[in-house]
Amino acid sequence: MTVEVRPVQDKQGLESFIRLPWQIYKGDPNWVPPLLTDQRLLHDPARNPFFEHSQIQNFLAWDSGRIVGRITAIRNTEHNRYWNDSVGFFGMFESERRPEVARALLREAARWLTGKGLTVARGPMNFSTNDDCGLLVDGFERPPVLMMPYNPTWYPELLTGAGLEKVKDLVAYFIEEASFPERLKQSVPKILERKKIKIRPMDMKNFERDVRLISEIYKGAWEKNWGFVPLTDHEIAHMAHSLRPAVDPNLILFAEVEGKPVGLSVALPDLYEALKHCNGRLFPFGLFQFLWHKRKIRMCRVLMLGVIEGYRNMGVDAGLVYELFRRGMARGISSGEMSWVLEDNIAMRRPIENIGARVYKTYRVYEAPVERLLT
């Protein structure tokens, strides 16, 4: 049997591409089916502002008339402009447990990247570090939380077998109310008062203003991080509009010193706890399942926790987490995932560990010269 990789060129092919995970993850109790409408939006050049500056090409792997894998080749021109490099990306990787399928998919993605003048393939990214990225390599025993990836245990061996190597690990922390040190519960409010740090929730009446503020703090706090890619104004507006229905303003907090915004914590309820019951559809019947299970959500995901330079190491980060937990517990949230954090970002990892969080999942980003993948 010969594996053939073909580009996705029409709506029928895209629909097959989007629906392949239902075949790969059949029977996996930890997999959370993505909403089909969200996946179609992600790949729609007319509705996703990512396509205003960058390009992708989806591919499907076939064997004897059957789809056995998929991959997306990505040229992120914003990344190349910001870092002044020639790195290309791959994402949306899914494959049966067959090394020849993975090699064929990566070879075709590398060929496409080469045609765009790119010399390195890095991934998985869907489609950048601002989206879900990395391959799960440790922590398979629990399902993913909101906007985090999940994959079978054998995917790492497929990627390394095709010639990819680790470039960076991303870690996810788990924390629950019982883990938060009692000494911090006593000391953090005093630190906030002494250093005149004010923490306020998001103001939904001034939603667009606070979204712009999130963008400004994000750029200031993350701009030196590995893999950082600035979002365009249109991308920020698009993301805010998409996430607004999930926003609990008391889980999005701003830290201010003398009126100046210096820190940010963004958390969302883990809607995957409810979405896993919908099988990719909210309508007509999935909505009832979603609303029923949404009431039972007891976990959140902290997507962002950052402090701008000049205001670090003064208790702002601990204050944000303390206040997040206080407000979350008042709404029935008893635990949270803080993800993701770069493995070598000690300045961020240390304060997270100091508040009682522990690493419970690890995601890996791989890369290789495209020439290696072409052989």
Image: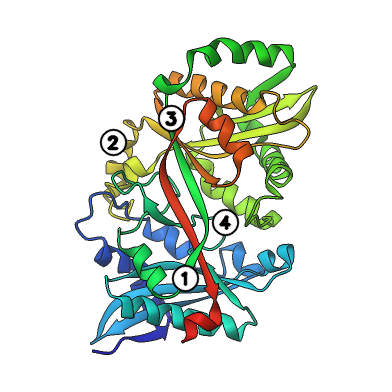
Question: On the picture, is 105 further left or further right than 169?
Answer: left
Q: Which residue is mark 4?
A: 129
For the residues labelled 2 and 4, say whether their Cβ atoms are less than 8 Å apart.
Answer: no
Q: Position of residue 292 (x, y in %)?
A: 28, 36
Residue at x 39%, y 79% (from the top left corner): 103
Cα distance in 3D space between marks 2 and 4: 32 Å
Alpha-carbon distance for marks 3 and 2? 25 Å
Q: Kindly indicate whether the residue at mark 2 contacts the one at mark 3 (C-beta within 8 angstroms).
A: no
Q: Which residue is mark 2?
A: 292
CA gap between label 4 and label 1 equals 18 Å
The residue carrying mark 3 is 175
Q: Are marks 4 and 3 in contact (CB under 8 Å)?
A: no
Above or below, 366 relative to 235: below
Vertical relation: 179 (above or below) 84: above
Which-is-in-front pick, marks 4 and 1?
Answer: 1
User: In this figure, which residue is indicated by the disc labeled 1?
Assistant: 164
Q: Considering only order in the chain, which callout, 3 or 4, is on the residue closer to the N terminus? A: 4
Q: Of callouts 2 and 1, which one flags the residue occurring earlier in the amino acid sequence?
A: 1
First in sequence: mark 3 or mark 2? 3
Instruction: Compute the Cα span from label 4 to label 3.
Output: 23 Å
147 displayed left or right of 236: left
Q: Residue at x 74, y 31 (%)?
A: 261
Is residue 9 something one can see in this rendering? no
